[in-house]
Amino acid sequence: MTFFAKQFACGALAALCASGIALPANAAWEPTRPVEFIIPAGTGGGADQMARTIQGIVTKHNLMKQPMVVINKAGGAGGEGFLDVKSSAGNPHKIIITLSNLFTTPLATGIPFNWKDLTPVAMLALDEFVLWVNADKPYKNVKDYVAALKAAPPGSMKMGGTGSKQEDQIITVAVEKATGGKFTYIPFRGGGEVAVQLVGNHVDSTVNNPIEAVAQWRGGKVRPLCVFDGQSMAYKDAIADGKSWADIPTCKSQGLDMEYLMLRGIFMTPKATKDQVAYYVELFKKVRDTPEWKDFMKSGAFNTTFMTGDEYAKWVGTEEQRHKQLMQEAGFLAGN
């Protein structure tokens, strides 16, 4: 740089400072190529619907300069997706949405993966579980359902769920212990398929998330009996038969003493930097502020708790221990 160029640069810098215009610090990190959004589950289920909703919101509102590409990697009860992200250390262009298989898959299979292998970003919401039956079945409440389960030959009633030794089967075992009944548990690849099987009377009941069966409820094909939460859901708009999510009683109040909520959260690859994590935290805050997200939360009757940072990591650690205990009681731990 010549003497005169240096003098000009210094003069320009001084003029900017004198004018009160803030000089930008080092530019914050942002994606420079498409971001892979991994779903460790099949299509049609709760995680898949949430990820694709997020993708649509990001695109519609131009929240990212780069595209977000949704990829399902459901193999090995989601282990395929988790191992892919784990093996992509230092790649900030890959994120993953989680469900309870964040805990259940490594505990049940022994695959070399733990949530601590990833970088926590944010809890987006907590998902409810509802006990559903086909609308043509005679049981109108939990009492009728439990009576039928106890009266049926052991294993003759079929419970459909997503995956084996995952959250749906954990809840199924808890129902068995609470009632003394016995199901034949039938696993499917995703909650969408589970709902279809219930409508077709190929299973007698399911414990699908609200969003996985709301369409079938609206269509009069399935009936919700109770929600596996300590309190009723907050949403009071009518969904079907003049009833709202808030009208569904808790299972505990109906004699099924079991509570279960599922994480819907985001993780990054190992070795993500603070700037990279901060970018995605801000991105998901923007997503949560959109009317589309709020409508999605309402339609799926989600618990809208949001966490980041140490609070989120602490919550995940506590849930890991809870799942370990539940799976040990059910005999689902690897090596049992």
Image (cartoon, helix red, strand yellow):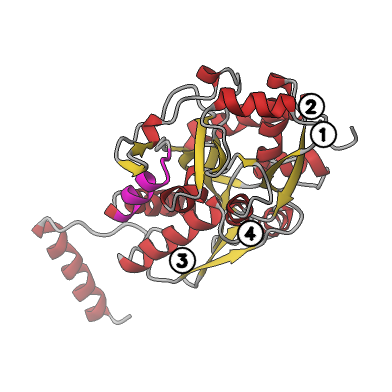
Q: Nearer the viewer, mark 4 or mark 1?
A: 4
Looking at the picture, tell me which residue is in the foreground, 81 or 199. 199
Q: Is residue 9 left or right of residue 132?
A: left
Instruction: Bin the neighbour count of mark 3 within 10 Å (Cα to Cα): few under 14, some 14-19, many 20 and up.
Output: some
- Do tag 2 and tag 1 residues touch (Cβ < 8 Å)? yes
Which numbered disc flags the more N-terminal residue, 4 or 1?
Answer: 4
Residue 328 tag number: 2
| Label 4 to label 3: alpha-carbon separation | 26 Å
Residue 31 tag number: 3
Looking at the picture, tell me which residue is in the foreground, 272 or 7. 272
Tell me where the magenta segment starts and ends, as one range: 292-302
Which structural element holds mark 4? loop
**Which residue is the site of mark 1?**
333
| Label 4 to label 1: alpha-carbon separation | 23 Å
- Do tag 4 and tag 2 residues touch (Cβ < 8 Å)? no
Q: Is residue 311 visible?
A: yes
- Do tag 1 and tag 3 residues touch (Cβ < 8 Å)? no
Which numbered disc flags the more N-terminal residue, 2 or 1?
Answer: 2
| Label 3 to label 2: alpha-carbon separation | 41 Å
**Which residue is the site of mark 4?**
42
Q: Amino acid at mark 2?
A: Gln
Which numbered disc flags the more N-terminal residue, 4 or 2?
Answer: 4
Q: Nearer the viewer, mark 4 or mark 3?
A: 4
Which structural element holds mark 1? loop
Q: Residue at x 66, y 43 (%)?
A: 102
Which numbered disc flags the more N-terminal residue, 4 or 3?
Answer: 3
Residue 213 tag number: none
Instruction: Bin the neighbour count of mark 2 within 10 Å (Cα to Cα): few under 14, some 14-19, many 20 and up.
Output: some
| Label 4 to label 2: alpha-carbon separation | 26 Å
Q: Amino acid at mark 1?
A: Leu
